Structures are given as C-alpha cells and as structure tokens.
Amino acid sequence: MTSSSPEPRKTRKELLSEWRHNEVLHAARHIFGRLGYAAANVEDIAKEAGMAKGTVYLYFKSKEEVFAAVLALDLERLTQETIDGMSAAESFVDRMTVFLNLRLAYLRNNRDFMRVYVAEFGSRGSGSTVIFEVKHRYIQRGIEFMRQCLERAIARDEIRTVPVEAAAYAIYDIARGYVERHLIGSTQLDPEEDLAFTHSLIVNGLQKHD
C-alpha cells in the first residue's frame, strides 16, 4: 500500500500573489457593477484593490481579461454547485428545482455585475473572443451534464424520450431567459413566481403523455 505525497506548501511569495490576484477580482466585480464596463478602467480597479495600476497588469493584460476572469470565477462556482446539487437530488423534478434555485440565488447575489455582462456581452454575437471562450467553456460543461441527467431520467422512465442534446440546450435557454428578464426588468412576475412557472414549463414539457 502506497501513500500519496502531501501537496507542497505554498511559499509566502505564492500566497501573496494569489491574494493579490483575488483582490483584483474582488475589486473588479465592485467597479464593473458600479460604473459599468465602458466607464471602468484598470486604474479604477487598482484603486479599489488598494494597489498600483502596474500590479494589476502583472496578472491581466487588459480590462477585458479582468472582466473575463471575474466571469470565469462566477461560472466555475455556479457550474460546480449545479453539478454537485443536481447529483445529490433523487428525481429529475428535484434536479430541475436545484438547477433553477441556484440561478435565482446567483441572480440575487450578483445582480449588478450580471446586468453589466448582459448589457455588454449577453448577445450571441458578442465581439469579445475572450468573453465568448469563457462562456462557451462553462456552457458546454453544463450542457453535457444536463444531457446526462436527461438520459438518466429517460432510462428511469421519469420523462418521455426526447433528443437529449436539444433538450439540454432548450433548458439552458429557458433558464437564461429567466435570468435576463429579471435583470432588465421586463417582467411583472416576482422572481419566485416566475421561477415556479419556469420549473413547471420545463417539467411539464418533458412529461410522458398517456
């Protein structure tokens, strides 16, 4: 029996670098949410983080890269929480509840930043390659997991047989629409009422018909 070697301890320099990197992202989230993407600049972010502008450039080449890093951090957290939460749920109905509830929680906790994201980069035709690559990476990971959930639900006779890839994309599109309409205020429904409707729309649309 062999034991795995312990992870090497980070040096003081590595810990300081990691802390500064996280401070930049924390500051950037506040600056983008407060000023918007166009009005914000690296100097604003550095000032908010309490460091020199040159220090920010040690970690990121541009404002766009900073924004992409904040978005990636959010999407990584949301995607992993979604996978973990849905994996623990017993039924497909419960997994959809977890999926949508996490998006409601994310909307509430990150409204200002996400409003900026939707305004600047939310369209499918966004001109930012960096932002597109971040979105694509996490969306594809989420779609693949949703496809597996759908396959499992079909095998367990919880839902009718559907093309799982198309259904996974449709569920993500419906969830994105839910988030976006509450960000831009284009619905009269409160978030919980809309969430219940969205949940029933997905579940009822996939139910087996007698």
Image (cartoon, helix red, strand yellow):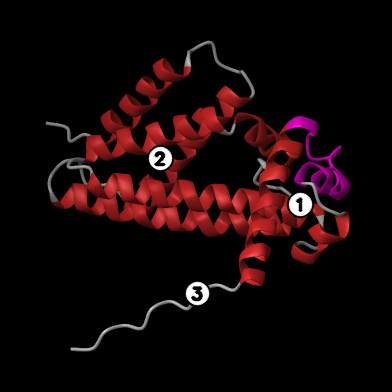
Q: Splitting the image into 4 quarters, where does residue 22 fall?
A: bottom right
Q: Is residue 191 above or below residue 71?
A: above
Q: In this rendering, would 174 be left or right of 150?
A: right
Mark 1 or 3, nearer chain start: 3
Front residue of 88 and 155: 88
Q: Quadrant of residue 11?
A: bottom right
* Lower position in the chain sequence, tag 2 or tag 3: 3
Position of 2 with respect to 77 (left or right) is left
Mark 1 element type: loop
Give the magenta range: 34-49
Determine which of the numbered discs, if any, sits on residue 171 in the image. Answer: 2
- Mark 1 residue crowding within 10 angstroms, few (<14) / some (14–19) / many (20+): few
Residue at 50 percent across and 74 percent down: it is 9
Which amino acid type corresponds to the residue marked 3 in the rendered image?
Arg
Q: Which residue is mark 3?
A: 9
Instruction: Pinpoint residue 104: horizontal percent, then vertical percent.
Output: 45, 29
Q: Position of residue 121 (x, y in %)?
A: 70, 43
- Residue at point 17% right, 36% down? 208
Provide the residue designation for mark 1: 127
Instruction: Decide: is 97 above or below 138.
Output: above
Cα gap from disc 2 to disc 3, whole angstroms: 42 Å
In the rendered view, tell whether residue 107 sits above or below residue 92: above
Q: Position of residue 170 (x, y in %)?
A: 43, 41
* Residue 9 inside the magenta-drawn segment: no
Quick one: label 2, few (<14), some, or many (20+) residues within 10 Å?
many
